[in-house]
Amino acid sequence: MCSMSSYRAGIYPREPKKKFDGVTKTYYLTKDIQFLLHEPVLGKIREIRAYRQKIKRARAKKEYGTLKTLLRNKPTYKIDHIVRERYPTFSDALRDMDDALSLVHMFQHLPSEKSIKPHRIRNCERLAKEFQNYVATTGSLDKVFVSVKGIYYSARIGGERAVWVEPHRFTQELPKDVDYRVMLTFLEFYECLLSFVNYRLYTTNGMPYPPKMDPIGGKDDQPDVEADRAHHVQENIAQILKKQEADEDDDDDSENDDEEELQMEEEETQQAKDGTEGKEKLVFSGLKVFLGRETPVSALEFVLRAQGAKVGWDGENSPFTSDERGLTHWVIDRPAIPGKRRMDLEYVQPQWVFDSVNNSTLLPTSIYGIGVTLPPHLSPFVDDVAEGYVPKYKAYLQRLKDGDPELFKETALAVNDDSEEDMDDLDNDDDNSQKEEAESKHEDGSSDSEDEDEDEEMEEDLAKDMAEMKEEGKKQSEELAKLMMSRKKRNLYERMVHGKNRKSDQVRKLEERRDAIETKKAKKRRARSETNQ
Amino acid sequence: MEGDEPGSPVVSDDEADSDLEKVEFEEVGDEIDGLIEEDDSSSDEEKNTIGDIPIRWYDGYDHIGYNREGKQIIRGKRKSPLEEILDPNAWRRVYDERNDEELVLTDKELDVVSRIRAGQYTGRTTEGDEEIVPWTSSKIEIHPLPEPTEPKRRFTPSKHEAAKVEKCIESWPAYTWTVAFSLLLIFLRNVIQVVKIVRAIRAGLIVKPAKAEKYGNLYSFDVWEEKEDDEEKSKTEQARDLMRIHAPKEPLPGHAESYNPPAEYLPTEQERKEWEEAEPEDRKTNFLPTKYDSLRKVPAYPTFIRERFERCLDLYTAVRVRKEKLRINPEDLIPKLPSPEELKPFPNYVSCSATCKSPVLSISMHPAGQFLAAACDDGFVRFFEVPVLKCVAEWQLHEEAIVNVDWCPKPNVLVFAACAGPSVIIGNACSEGLGTEANAIDSRALLAGDEIGDNVSQGNEGEWTEEEDKSVEIKLKRRARNVAWHHGGDYLASVARDTTGSSVAIHRLSKRQSQVPFKKSGASAQVVSFHPSRPFIFIASKQHIRVYNLQKQVLVKKLLPGARWISSLSVHPSGDHLLVATYDMKLCWFDLDLSNLPYKILRNHDEAIREARFHPKLPLFADCSDDGTVLVSHGMVYNDLLQNALIVPLKRIDKNLAETPKLRATTLAWHPSLPWLFTSSGDKKIYLFTNVN
């Protein structure tokens, strides 16, 4: 029953209006059970059971010839009809891919065990790879999020969004209190589903199936994806960066840095030009990225490839080595650059890749440089309006994308507070503090001028009082009207208000914390600048 | 015989015939031999010694074999067919091909031949003349002779052979099926077994094992090939689609789940501790936000597999229920009521207050609107003049506290009734110098009553004593708690504090008579009130309100407010509506025409409601509660029976009193015509609320 219903996936307990057999029972629709009874797989499963007994008997009787034949000719069953029944059309299947992808991506990393057969793991690995290859080749990956649990990917396929999570690449410890049979039954269905989806995706897009998996990053036949917005954004960023760098250049003393900045600038302009040409449309198109040994290579390769970059890594099957000419970026996850710093490319931390994809633009590499404290990695799945709270870095990125001209006046690294400690932008700190002082002065001034015209103020106060009274009256009448609500409605209203309040409380808490952290930092900064002076 | 050979008359017959004869002879050889021996023993001897070989082997030679001497037997010359025909004995001649001689059958021999042909015994002596011994047929058996039935194995396929076939099949390599078949043909050589195998294959008993497909390639085809996306679904598919509730997707991760979340999402030390100490099912999130300053430092998530497993469990064990998500603004749930501004006038501000000498337990407003009577804790009834709330008179009625006071509803008289201890006292306020001369005359007349007959005093439940023109005291058996006047001004009802047994007494002032009409059902009465126009009385027990018709002396209605303890009762001036205040914080509005259940239950207060009163003229009502607030509401009653009463809360009076932070209002009274409200309580204060704009 259990395994069948999980195969069926469309059969699950229901909530009857009246629980005739008590609340502790699980209730299913009679129709569903009838449906299960007529399931062809059921007969097959019974057959297999009988067959297993035959094997057992042959083994007990030591009829090895029979046993050999029996083992060779084991009956099998197929569940393609269940997939067809569960998802009558392909788009139905696409709508429900999340769980399938997540489970298959998890199983490919599990160690094989008594119940988890190696051929299943291999099959999962193959399916996941095929799917990722499809996503990478069609460029349909739109979001990546590195969480403490694993890496979330989101791809748009056939107008539907599929989100799946892949665990971090470690040997998974198999917990004892988990029923693997349940998961394996689900996995069997999902493997079947994913096979069909992969086949269909490949064949309808004119790609050969099974695909030839080549480890070479960056495909020539990139599909055309509309990304005008991204170009626009890129242009904006390029402009801002130019200005920023120009400012920074003034401050910088060392020639080395100067040179680097110049190079960066050139590159940025180059990128901007590329953007205007409109040839490359994906975020990383035209880039040649090399991945360090310590980075999560498979994840990064997938993401970079999906966004149009050519990828090489420090390991086997890499299409190119670190000596390759024309490398644009080197992804490193170390406190310092190993070996001599190369001037012809940029060193970034892995988060730069993910954040760039999420913002569908190349973010300034200076924020993600080696040894720099990283800005927060934000979830791309959060709806700011619904959430009610926008982290500061997100707001900053939004302004960056909008091409806010004010932005370059401020310190680019204001968001990235900790990084200031290593940087030499003390001047900016001073500016900030001066500004703050000026503001406080202004406030004082306004308080001084209060005494001048009291009469006016009296009138104002009166008007204010009147308005307040009116407001209060309105509030009170509303309060009284609430008394007339029926109990049902009142309960509903209270619940809704409670929910709203809880949310706003959460937002307030976050804001308060942020303010506290910021004031603390500002104080530190000021203290530091004072000691410096 | 040799001698006969050339010259013996040979009767030649047809060759075929002679062959036939010969065969027959051969078959019955033994018997014939025996027969012939007697006559012609020499003729029996075989001349030819070639043995039992076909004579045709000698076809090409001129001899037909060798005799006993080893000499060739030369083939003799055969007669021509014509000669044979001419020979009259030809029919009895037989040609012996082997010995090349012709035999002439004797009559005896002919007889044997003819007998054999007829299927008879050869010898005449062996004709079936012998006596038949009836071994078995002499007895007639009732059971059939033990002729055994055919065993089953004659009809079923041989097990032995089946085992043989099976053995070959088992040792039959799957991949060389055809080779095996041919090999089998060669080896078995047993046609029957091969035929059996072939039959078994044709019957589908032996199946050629299908080539097992590789696990991964099992589903490499397009399952949705024949079905296009836009194609309409079949009816069953549609039905199942309708019935199916899709599993909700997993919630997407927020900023807090990031490996490098913004600092404000990180838990404080206390939150971390709380999270760690809580049971896993009590935690709000299944992870603790943690910051790693670099991606390489992110460890494996320990409960990843568990979470996926739980998701699987949810998918097939969790009950799925379709829930309508309300997309409404909570503000829309608040009923749209007319603004209080439109429903003016109503009392909203304290215009005047007075301090009584002792705590006030009950107040009552005179129907003429000039005097307010306050029943005090110290046994006094004090009279205040409206609107200035000046205490114009005080009158000690009793030593004990006056618990209730009520003015006679006739506007021209100044007579009140009050409860104190076990007595109900009807006082004439004019005797304290209140009112005009006309009032005094009317009051005196009312108080004087009719002539009292002797018969009336019998069965009187109360003990009536009177003080000329001033007061009448009715001493009851039990302590009274509540008194109410009938609108005629002659009757009044009182309720005893002790609620066991019948507690409602009805007194007739003119006749000086008291009755306890509700012997049983009057039990546990709390409050009592008369209908303003009809001969009805409302008696509220703790949980119910009974409406009696006093003329017919029947129970008209039983109202169920659903409360535990009724505190007060007020009848609308129209008589069709009832306001019931309860100690369990509910205020029930009954529409008597509608139902015996409340038309509206208002939960306006956080504590017990002491009293609720309708305004005698205006569409207003007010209730006061222990939480220190008085709520003034608009209660419009329409003449149209189809239109229900409109209830709008207008004003909650609580914090407009600077001197008393919490107005403990326990009793209230309305001005008879103006929207003025009086409240009082144990804090000795009496307030007048008026409509200030």
Image (cartoon, coloured by chain):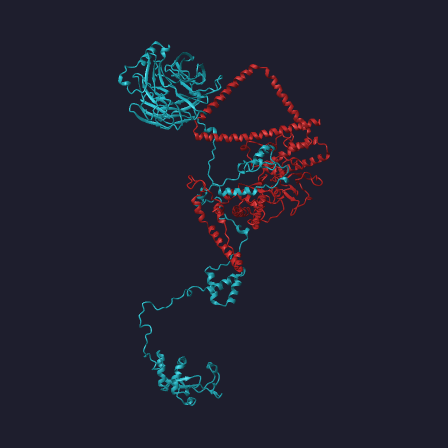
Chain colours: A red, B cyan
Q: Residue at x 49, y 53 (%)?
A: A48
Determine the image quadrant of residue B115. Answer: bottom left
Q: Considering the image in quadrants, where does the C terminus of chain A appear?
A: top right
Instruction: Classify residue B155 as left or right of residue A90.
Output: left
Judge by depth and name the residue closer to the eye, A187 or B240.
Answer: A187
Q: Is residue A32 above or below residue B435?
A: below
* Residue B420 spot, x, y in % from top left: 38, 18
* Residue B429 spot, x, y in % from top left: 36, 12
Q: Residue at x 41, y 41 (%)?
A: A20
Q: Residue at x 71, y 39 (%)?
A: A341
Residue B693 visible within the image: no
Judge by depth and name the residue closer to the eye, B194 or A19.
Answer: A19
Determine the image quadrant of residue A136. Answer: top right
* Residue B152 spot, x, y in % from top left: 41, 64
Instruction: Classify residue A507 as left or right of residue B436.
Output: right
Residue A282 visible within the image: yes
Determine the image quadrant of residue B145. Answer: bottom left
Q: Is residue A430 above or below residue B104?
A: above
* Residue B508 spot, x, y in % from top left: 31, 18
Count of marks, rendered view: 0
